[in-house]
Image (cartoon, grey):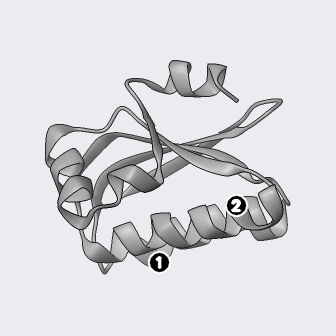
Amino acid sequence: MEISNTQFKHCDLVSVKGRVDSATAPQLSDALDAITKTAGRYRIIVDLSGVDFISSAGLRVLIATQKECRRYNRGEVFLAAIPPKVQSALELAGFDALFKIYKDALAAVGNF
């Protein structure tokens, strides 16, 4: 799995490529924790266009980050460019209602 972070004026764009499963979810968690807990930035867009599979461990990381960002109304996590397989996993878990979802990262960045 590859993770890259681009910092903008109002938000951070985290691009994820590969599989997000129980082996790689801690890596994603560490990357998102570095933004929230270390840098103190709470407006995050997760670009999932390169993700071909996400497990429950990956979904837990996204939910935990969303909870951290929304605490005290500091920010939020947006999801962008979700592939159909990942979208169906989000819907099956009922997590699609917990995130604002955008067709591409540019639209998500424009809404922060």
Against 91, residue 5 (above or below) is: above
Of the numbered discs in the image, which one, if any, rests on residue 69?
Answer: 2
Q: Toward which corner of the image does residue 71 lie, by quadrant?
A: bottom right
Query: Badge 1: how crowded within 10 Å, few (<14), some, or many (20+)?
Result: some
Of residues 89 and 53, the one nearer the viewer is 89
Query: Badge 2: how crowded within 10 Å, few (<14), some, or many (20+)?
Result: many
**Who's the residue at 36% across and 69% down the image?**
58
Q: From the image, tell me which residue sits under label 1.
A: 26
**Who's the residue at 30% across and 80% down the image?**
22
Classify residue 95 as left or right of residue 43: left
Of residues 44 and 38, the one nearer the viewer is 44
Disc 2 and disc 1: Cα gap in Å?
18 Å
Callout 2 secondary element:
helix
Can residue 3 be seen from the camera position used here? yes
Against 27, residue 3 (above or below) is: above
**Who's the residue at 64% across and 24% down the image?**
111
Callout count: 2
Classify residue 20 as left or right of residue 64: left
Q: Viewer-nearest of labels 2 and 1? A: 2
Callout 1 secondary element:
helix
Amino acid carrying label 2: it is Cys
Amino acid carrying label 1: it is Pro
